[in-house]
Amino acid sequence: MNELRELRRKIGLGQREFAALLSIPLETFRPWDSGRRIASLAVVQRAREAVAHYQRQHERLPLDQLAQELHVHVRTLQAAVRTGRLDAHFSVKSVFGRPRRLATRAAAERFMTTHYRRFGGQLRCPSPLPTIPNNYDRKLRALRRRLRLTQGGLARCIGAAGKAVIYQWESRKRTPSPVLWQRVMELERRGRRATHERAMRKREQPTRNGGATPILEHLSNV
């Protein structure tokens, strides 16, 4: 059993990222990972500690728990999520009809470093989050048909928790959050741009059969 490789796969990192996590040159790490050389016990122990720290930093936690750890009010983190200054994930489970928001310690620490109580030299905030349209369910179904995506595929594209979230949006059992709806809009823009670029390339190709224009192929990937 190659424990070093198992530890790397446990947190889903590639060889380059894991070597950087351990502060080891990639050329040195690769023979250990492939099993051509045996890593020392000290290296394996360092990898165990690094993986434990990585898992702790990237564990998704409720905002109220993060607020307690960071000694800030939970509304501070809630406002940061709404404005896009704190990267958050939305759980399938909801609280009082609202999706449960989760964030990692790493994301919370980035927010505290770059935004919290910084009145000068603060990084530029993202654009204001969009308003959810009343016909969001029809827009989602139309977008999925145009991009040929399943509910699960759309969830993966925008970083939603799973296909159950998309189903609840399309059946109007739940309203999308502004953060995730912004990702939906960005996906739609990328799809339209890709369709336009494909059409332009087709027009630039020589015509066939005495001037007949080839049929535009459908957008299958964004």
Image (cartoon, helix red, strand yellow):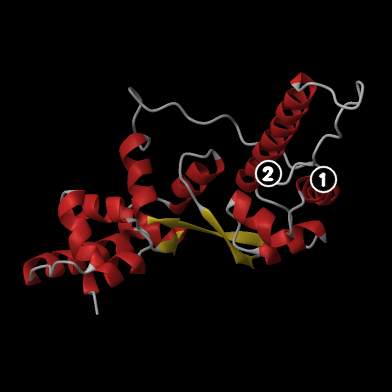
Q: N-terminal of the two: label 1 or label 2? A: 1
Tell me what residue is drawn at x 35 percent, y 59 percent.
Answer: 68
Query: Is 75 on the left-hand or right-hand side of 42?
Result: right
Can residue 153 be seen?
Answer: yes
**Name of the residue lying farthest toward the bottom:** 1
For numbered disc 2, what is the local secondary structure?
A: helix
Q: Is disc 2 surrounded by few (<14), some (14 to 19) or many (20+) residues within 10 Å?
A: many
Q: Specify the amino acid type for callout 1.
A: Lys
In the image, residue 190 lies at what x, y percent? 67, 35
What label does residue 114 carry, if any? none
Q: Quadrant of residue 187?
A: top right
Q: Specify the amino acid type for callout 2.
A: Val
Can residue 23 be seen?
Answer: no
From the viewer's side, name the closer residue of 196 and 77.
196
In the image, residue 124 lies at what x, y percent? 44, 26
In the image, residue 65 lies at what x, y percent? 40, 62
Please, is residue 109 above or below residue 53 in the view?
above
Quarter of the image that includes the C terminus: top right
From the viewer's side, name the closer residue of 161 and 61.
161
Quarter of the image that includes the N terminus: bottom left
For numbered disc 1, what is the local secondary structure?
A: helix
**Name of the residue lying farthest toward the front:** 209
Tell me what residue is drawn at x 68 percent, y 64 percent.
Answer: 163
Find disc 1 in the rendering and name its residue.
139
Q: Quadrant of residue 61?
A: bottom left
Tell me what residue is drawn at x 48 percent, y 42 percent.
Answer: 80
User: Number of numbered discs present?
Assistant: 2
Please, is residue 26 above or below residue 186 in the view?
below
What label does residue 184 carry, if any? 2
User: What's the CA distance linking mark 1 and mark 2?
Assistant: 10 Å
* Image marks 1 and 2: residues in contact by CB distance under 8 Å: yes
